Image: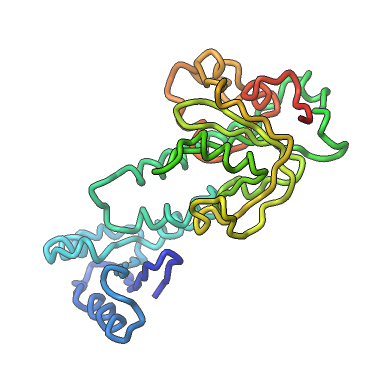
């Protein structure tokens, strides 16, 4: 039995293959027993998962049984190699725990979460491929005034979305105006360190602020963070600049000048660029924040 921090209990039954008939009643009885023993609250918090060892198994027999018995909301099937692939995505692509559950849970009527997951993984792949792009020579010789000698300063772009009570701009102003920002456990934002710079993209608006990282992220609840259970890592910022009234719009013209879009058509879809916190080059950071150079405010 695997227990998710979200409260979902996954009861696993391992099979070599589905060549021989697998009775779903067996796994269902395991879960019923765990519920009766109060080790699982109820079926609303339970999921049965068959892990099949043979990667060449077609799984048709097991799939047909689950469908025929109308157990698609209670039972799932995965081959062991795909389970390991999911683990690699979690480790190598900083995939969030909730994203893993999105894959394993039965699909509901809303597909937004799955699309967000796909877009986020594509964005990380594109960013990783672009990390080898060298910055223009003139940028490597002119260090920002605030950049200490010998320190490897990194630059980040963090997208922020609106919630049910505040616009993205209001969320940004509330947090960095107070000198803090919060990220999730699996966010690339957890890698920031003092001296790094981060700019903030308000979804559907543009870049509306930037700041310098003052402290490393630490796990704690902050009263200004609306969902502290999700955004549980908080770091301090200083040298804050907020320009919500005059945002930097990511137009095709601007995108064409960014290192991130080298070799890409800036007129095509670019949502990957603002899917999750990601690193940008110093050259791109200065364009995104309208600076000839990054200066201490």
Q: Position of residue 286 (x, y in %)?
A: 68, 23
Q: Is residue 132 left or right of residue 163?
A: right
Quarter of the C terminus within the rendering: top right
Q: From the viewer's side, name the closer residue of 195 and 222.
A: 222
Considering depth in this image, is 247 or 102 the residue closer to the camera?
247
Q: Nearer the viewer, residue 259 or 41?
A: 41
Q: Please, is residue 76 above or below residue 204 in the view?
A: below
Number of marks in the image?
0
The quadrant holding residue 62 is bottom left
- The image quadrant where one finds the N terminus is bottom left
View extreme (left): residue:
68
Q: Position of residue 218 (x, y in %)?
A: 66, 57
Q: Residue furthest right?
A: 149
What residue lies at 36% left-to-right and 46% top-to-bottom? Answer: 113
Query: Is residue 205 rendered to the left or right of residue 215?
Result: left
Instruction: Tell me, yes or no, if residue 185 can be seen here.
Output: no
> Which x, y percent locates residue 202?
51, 32
Could you tell me which residue is drawn at 58 percent across and 37 percent down? 173
Protein image colouring: rainbow
Figure quadrant of residue 44 = bottom left
User: Is residue 21 in view?
Assistant: yes
x and y percentages locating residue 190 in the rendered image: 63, 50
**Where is 55 relative to 22, above or below?**
above
25 sits to left or right of 165:
left
Determine the residue positioned at 67% across, 43% down.
179
Image quadrant in which you'd find residue 155: top right
Query: Is residue 215 found left or right of 227 in the rendered image?
Result: right
Q: Residue furthest top?
A: 253
């Amino acid at each position: 039995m695997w227990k998710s921090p979200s409260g979902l209990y996954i009861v696993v039954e391992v099979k070599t293959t589905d060549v021989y008939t697998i009775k779903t009643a067996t796994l269902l009885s395991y879960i019923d027993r765990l519920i009766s023993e109060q080790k699982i609250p109820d079926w609303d918090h339970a999921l049965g998962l068959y892990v099949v060892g043979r990667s060449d198994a077609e799984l048709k027999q097991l799939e047909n049984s689950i469908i025929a018995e109308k157990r698609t909301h209670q039972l799932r099937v995965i081959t062991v190699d795909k389970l390991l692939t999911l683990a690699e995505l979690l480790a190598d692509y900083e995939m969030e725990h909730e994203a893993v559950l999105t894959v394993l849970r039965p699909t509901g009527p809303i597909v937004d979460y799955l699309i967000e997951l796909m877009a986020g993984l594509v964005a990380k792949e594109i960013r990783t491929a672009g990390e080898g792009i060298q910055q223009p020579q003139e940028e490597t010789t002119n260090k920002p005034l605030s950049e200490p000698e010998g320190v490897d300063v990194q630059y980040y772009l963090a997208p922020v979305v609106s919630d049910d009570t505040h616009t993205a701009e209001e969320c940004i102003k509330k947090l960095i105006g107070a000198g803090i920002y919060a990220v999730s456990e699996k966010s690339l934002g957890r890698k920031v360190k003092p001296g790094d710079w981060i700019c903030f993209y308000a979804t559907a608006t543009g870049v509306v602020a930037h700041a310098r990282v003052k402290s490393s992220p630490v796990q704690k609840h902050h009263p200004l963070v609306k969902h502290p259970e999700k955004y549980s890592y908080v770091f301090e910022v200083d040298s804050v600049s907020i320009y919500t009234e005059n945002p930097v719009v990511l137009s095709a013209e601007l995108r064409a000048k960014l290192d991130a879009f080298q070799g890409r058509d800036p007129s095509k879809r670019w949502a990957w660029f603002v899917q999750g916190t990601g690193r940008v080059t110093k050259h791109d950071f200065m364009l995104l924040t309208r600076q000839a150079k990054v200066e201490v405010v």
